[in-house]
Image (cartoon, rainbow, N blue to C red):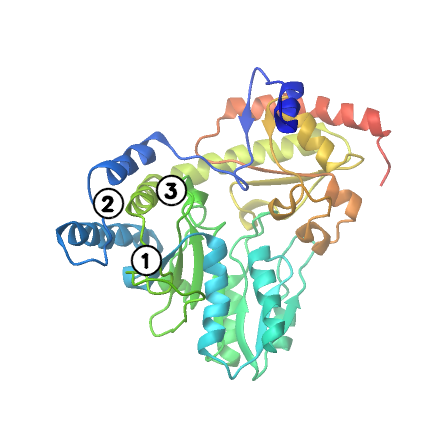
Amino acid sequence: MSNVEDLLEQHGKAIKEVYLDWENGTRIEEEVLETMKPFYLEKQFGNPAITHRVGWETYDFYVKAKSAIAKPLNADPQSIALTHSFTESNNLAIKGLAKMNKKRKKIIVSEVEHLSVIHTAKSMFKEDYKVKILPVSNDGTVNVDILQEELDDETLLVSIQSINHEIGTVQPVKEALEIVKDFDEKIFFHTDATSAFGRIPLDLSKLEVDLASFSSNRILGPKGIAGLYIKDGIKLKSIYEGQLSVEILSPDVENPALLAGFAKAVELQFSQFDEIKAHTTKLRDKLMYGLHTSIERTDVNGPAGKRRAPDNINVSFLGCEGEALTVESSMNGIYASSGSACTSRVLMPSHILTAIGRKPEEAHGSLLMKVNRLNTEEEINYVLETMPKVVDRIRSITGGIQI
């Protein structure tokens, strides 16, 4: 028996299970799977770049599916480049832009960006780029006054996410964009809209950003496919080489089944957008405020109300340790994550939580939960009934270390 099998046997399985770790791993719905199956087995499975009947049929589907994905973003389908993940989209936005514009050598990002933005920006040091990191307030909001101060003639790109993936802060993207463009129209503006896609209205024609990343799996579509919106007239260079394909910036053989699943997930999410937003907001508030009021020494991380993503709950249970929280919660059938999704299995405090002023021990005691259209009020009730016992048990073992 492997170590993992032994661990699972010791762990056991709870009678009731509630999955709230949608930030780190997602499933697809039956309708999405059924939509994808024929593209693996029967139809339009060809390479859309090849000039024969199967290729043409696949290309016809390809164009229609991209139009379906672009529609809720109010974007031209031709402005959407398909990628394999939002990490690739973020890399392409930053590195692809830098490859095409080598005169300016400064990139500005916020300190609460996803690590795929922060690490990509910092990787440009070896290309003699300067990278400036914008601080945030204690609720995670980017400081636009400091953004104004950092802009200069060397600035190539500003990247500020639409919604923070960990504490749910809705960022002042429009205000930041106006500051940037008023200073210099030639400075490019990118937003990682991955956590905003399908959660808040995202009209790219009105928002007027130059580049925006988004992903299929964040709306219960398949993993392995995402998108990058590129405003008309902006040129990027591919960050890797490959064969001839329809997607010039992501050279590979396109996967029609994934594209079909992505388009179906978009249809399901946006055809009932208002209902889903109301549903998740209700569950978010019930869970977040329920935990805050029923468990002593519990702090909410991030803003409240409309300035918070409708699906995001992040709380710190003071006197608890993150790994113990996730394990004990899991043994009770509640699946969530501690700290940042990108630093799981590494005992380091989340860079998001330390950026908003949390001490390392407070950050370690945080729990990130997200809700979506599949979660129910009954599940939230179970979490509210169970988590006080989980926290009490951990504090009884650790002595409830005072912070």
Quadrant in which the N terminus appears: top right
The single residue placed furthest to the left in the displayed view is 53
Q: Residues within 10 Å of mark 1 (few under 14, many from 20)?
A: some
Q: Amino acid at mark 1?
A: Asn
Q: Amino acid at mark 3?
A: Phe
> Which of the two marks, 1 or 2, is nearer to us in this view?
2
Lower sequence index among marks 3 and 2: 2
Q: Is residue 365 visible?
A: yes
Q: Are circles 3 and 2 on residues that touch, CB within 8 Å?
A: no
Spatial separation of the CA atoms under disc 3 and disc 1:
15 Å
Q: Are circles 1 and 2 on residues that touch, CB within 8 Å?
A: no
The residue where tag 1 is placed is 74
Q: Residues within 10 Å of mark 2 (few under 14, many from 20)?
A: many
Query: Horizontal placement of 372 versus 285: left or right?
Result: left
Q: Which mark is residue 116?
A: none
Q: Element type at marker 2?
A: loop
Q: Percent position (x, y) of residue 124?
A: 58, 71
The residue where tag 3 is placed is 273
Query: Horizontal placement of 271 versus 311: left or right?
Result: left
Quadrant in which the C terminus appears: top right
The residue where tag 2 is placed is 45
Q: Element type at marker 1?
A: loop
Q: Element type at marker 3?
A: helix
Does residue 242 sit above or below 169 in this rendering? below
Spatial separation of the CA atoms under disc 3 and disc 2:
30 Å
Q: Is residue 384 visible?
A: no
> Which of the two marks, 3 or 2, is nearer to us in this view?
2
Query: Horizontal placement of 55 versus 322: left or right?
Result: left
Q: Percent position (x, y) of residue 133?
A: 65, 67
